[in-house]
Amino acid sequence: MSLASFTPPPPAPLSPAPLPPAPLPPAPLSPDATLITPRGPGLLPWLAEAWRTRRIALMLARRSLKARYRQTWLGAGWAILQPLLLMLVYWGIFGHLLGVPTGGDAPYPVFAFTGLVLWQFFSRALMDASASILHQAHFVTKVYFPRLHMPLASLMVAAVDMAAGLVCLALLLAVFRIWPEVRWLLLLGPLALLLVTGAGAALLLSALVLRFRDVGHLLPLTTQVLMVAAPVIYPAHLVPGVMGAVYRLNPMVTVIEGARTALLGTPAPEPVPALLSVALAAGLLLLGLRTVRRMEPAMADLI
């Protein structure tokens, strides 16, 4: 047979490739397991995730409380003793020597202690929350959870101290024969504004300290200046004119003056500056939330 008439045999059919094994069904989650799923963009999904994991903030707050008062004789009594001692000092200087008026018939010790308890919450929230993320770098670099919980935990600790101070304030009111009235319910408004203002400032500072460390060094001095610029130991009506109009835009002025109105019957804050200060506090809270959320992906690198 010649090569020209040779026909090669047809190629053998290829065997089909083996099919990949079927994927295994996901293992059932235990009741204590936490499933982390990608969240959507925007502030609201981020806040929803923080709400779902709110137990982390409670755990961090409990841990901070135990660490703060560990191996101390008075324990949480320091939250009451500090404003009491300051009240006695200010009573001697401003109440007796200088005769600072209270804007009503309220005794100066109760007048000053009301402002000190509220200011102590704001000051402690700023000081503790500003360094809350920086001082817990081991959590930030190793464990994922919304960083919002760290400054909020510091805020909760400050709120516990304020609650102890308010109990002492109630006893002090009884000593001066100032008994509960219906208007005491108005105290809820200033307390809510205080929480909003403290949360906004704490969140904003906790994020800024990571990028600008000088903020942490300036904060103690800034807090002392802000205390002088708030009616903690004097009534707000002593600041007159244009300066007084700008002064009353400070949310802490509305907080302290509103609390004294509710408890002591002193003149109420002017309505227009009070409403503007509420708007400023709400804007501060929104700015703090947006700042923490925007800086959250880079926090581990900044630390």
Image: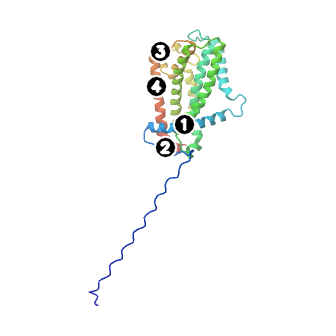
Q: Residue at the far right: name it.
A: 73
In the picture of the structure, the residue carrying the numbered disc 2 is 297
Cα distance between the residues tagged 1 and 2? 19 Å
Q: Are marks 4 and 1 in contact (CB under 8 Å)?
A: no
In the picture of the structure, the residue carrying the numbered disc 3 is 270
> Which one is in front in this view, the residue at disc 4 or the one at disc 1?
1
Specify which label sits upstream in the sequence, 3 or 1. 1
The structure residue drawn at horizontal position 63% and vertical position 12%, both measured from the top left corner, is: 95
| 86 and 225: which is toward the camera | 86
Q: Residues within 10 Å of mark 4 (few under 14, many from 20)?
A: some
Q: Are marks 3 and 1 in contact (CB under 8 Å)?
A: no
> Which one is in front in this view, the residue at disc 3 or the one at disc 1?
1
In this view, 256 is above or below 49: above
Secondary structure of residue under mark 4? helix
**Badge 2 amino acid:** Pro
Cα distance between the residues tagged 4 and 1? 26 Å
In the picture of the structure, the residue carrying the numbered disc 1 is 54
Q: Residues within 10 Å of mark 3 (few under 14, many from 20)?
A: few
Cα distance between the residues tagged 2 and 3? 42 Å
| 120 and 168: which is toward the camera | 168
Specify which label sits upstream in the sequence, 2 or 4. 4
Q: Position of residue 1 (x, y in %)?
A: 29, 90
Q: Residues within 10 Å of mark 2 (few under 14, many from 20)?
A: few
Cα distance between the residues tagged 3 and 1? 37 Å
In the picture of the structure, the residue carrying the numbered disc 4 is 280
Specify which label sits upstream in the sequence, 3 or 4. 3
